[in-house]
Image (cartoon, rainbow, N blue to C red):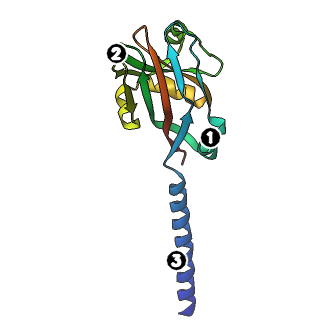
């Protein structure tokens, strides 16, 4: 009887270890939020457009999970856009791969990937965009994910109308990434 009890106890211990091991693998899968704080930008019609640069190789959360990334489930931005002109402006965000950096509106529109479009900012005002609201303006999600997976890319803020004169501050990129099982 004592042997049966010991065998049963050992079987239960092995079963519990297997159960907790399977549970631990489930904990390591799922979604992780990666946050990247971006540099402020200014852009105006007729001036050289300066891009911001993103290098996810320097982002600790991205690097911690890089080997386990299965995909990007969600993408959002937060920022403050100030319209310095005397006409309403519709803000746009473009990205380009690291090996392509554009300096004119025409080149950005022709070659960049439009990420956000239609953020209306009245003349002389500032508008704050929260990440939840950025979904309303999100475009080309699949193309943007490809650029992000390159880990280094440029971003540009311009406006659909010309002339424009905008300042974009407090820019944050939010990415929800999912891990491999």
| Foreground: disc 3 or disc 1 | 1
In 3D space, how far apart are the residues under numbered discs 3 and 1 (Cα atoms)? Answer: 43 Å
The correct choice, above or below, for 15 with respect to 24 in the image is: below
Q: Position of residue 156 (x, y in %)?
A: 53, 20
Of helix, strand and loop, which one carries label 1?
Answer: loop
Q: From the top left corner, tell me how far across and down residue 107 is, in percent.
A: 55, 8
Is tag 2's residue or tag 3's residue first in the polypeptide sequence?
A: 3
Give the mark, 1 or 2, whose residue is nearer the N terminus: 1
Marks 1 and 3: in contact by CB < 8 Å?
no
Residue at figure coordinates x 54%, y 60% from the top left? 24
Q: For label 1, count other residues whose C-alpha is less than 10 Å away and answer few (under 14), some (14-19) or many (20+).
A: some
Q: Position of residue 131 (x, y in %)?
A: 41, 36
Please name the residue shown 37% across and 37% down the image. 132
Give 40 or 116, whichever is nearer the viewer: 40
Give the CA separation, mark 2 to mark 3: 70 Å
The quadrant where residue 78 appears? top left
Compared across the picture, whether 85 is left or right of 57 comes to left
**Helix, strand or loop for disc 2:** loop
From the top left corner, tell me how far across and down residue 170 is, in percent: 49, 34
Classed neighbour count for the residue bearing mark 2: other residues with Cα under 10 Å, few (<14), some (14–19), many (≥20): some
Tell me if label 2 and label 3 are in contact, CB under 8 Å.
no
Q: Nearer the viewer, residue 10 or 19?
A: 19
Locate residue 11: give its quadrant: bottom right
| Residue matched to label 2 | 88
Q: Which residue is mark 3?
A: 12
Q: Is label 1 or label 2 in front?
A: 2
Q: Is residue 139 above or below residue 175?
A: above
Q: Which mark is residue 59?
A: 1
**Helix, strand or loop at mark 3:** helix
């Amino acid at each position: 009887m004592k042997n049966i009890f010991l065998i049963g106890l050992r079987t239960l211990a092995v079963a519990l270890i297997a159960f907790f091991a399977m549970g631990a693998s489930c904990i390591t899968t799922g979604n992780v939020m990666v946050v990247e704080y971006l540099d402020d930008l200014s852009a105006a019609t007729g001036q050289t457009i300066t891009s911001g640069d993103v290098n996810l190789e320097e982002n600790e959360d991205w690097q911690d999970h890089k080997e386990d990334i299965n995909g990007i489930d969600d993408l959002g931005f937060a920022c403050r856009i100030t319209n310095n002109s005397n006409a309403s402006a519709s803000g746009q965000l473009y990205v380009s791969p690291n090996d392509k950096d554009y300096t004119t509106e025409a080149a950005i529109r022709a070659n960049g990937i439009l990420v956000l479009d239609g953020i209306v900012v009245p003349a002389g005002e500032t508008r704050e965009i929260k990440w939840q609201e950025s979904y309303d303006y999100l475009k080309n999600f699949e193309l943007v994910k490809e650029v992000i997976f390159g880990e280094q890319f440029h971003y540009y803020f311009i406006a659909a109308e010309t002339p424009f004169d905008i300042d974009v501050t407090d820019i944050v990129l939010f990415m929800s990434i999912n891990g491999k099982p």
